[in-house]
Amino acid sequence: MTFGDAAARWAGLAALNLARRPPEFWSATPAELLSIVGLWLEQAGGAAPAMDPAELARLKEIFPDE
């Protein structure tokens, strides 16, 4: 699976979890998505942990851009 394939899968899951239909999700700006995620995290009672550089490097190894 390529990074693009994984990103598309995760985007679909995000759209479902954020209760957005595909056209609404794909037409949203990054700022709109960030505000939706912020509200979702607020309701969940916390913030998402930041990704550390080692984890990012590991993901780049698993999903190299081709």
Image (cartoon, grey):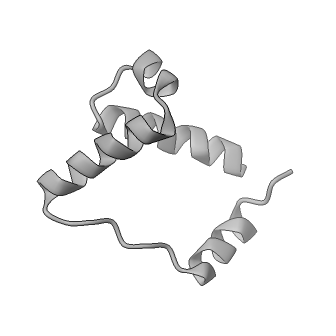
**Residue 1 visible to the viewer:** no
On screen, 53 above or below 60?
below
Q: Is residue 62 left or right of residue 39?
A: right
On screen, 25 above or below 48?
above
Q: Residue at x 62, y 72 (%)?
A: 56
The residue lying furthest to the right in this view is 66
Q: Is residue 22 left or right of residue 42?
A: right
On screen, 33 above or below 2?
above
Residue closest to the eye, 3 or 18: 18
Where residue 60 sits in the image (x, y, percent)?
71, 67
Q: Is residue 1 left or right of residue 33?
A: right
On screen, 36 above or below 42?
above
Q: Residue at x 61, y 83 (%)?
A: 54
Q: Residue at x 50, y 22 (%)?
A: 27
Q: Quadrant of residue 57?
A: bottom right
The residue lying furthest to the front in this view is 31
Residue closest to the eye, 52 or 9: 52
Q: Residue at x 33, y 66 (%)?
A: 48
Where residue 46 sits in the image (x, y, percent)?
20, 66
Q: Quadrant of residue 61?
A: bottom right
**Residue 50 visible to the viewer:** yes
Tally of marks: 0
The residue lying furthest to the bottom in this view is 54
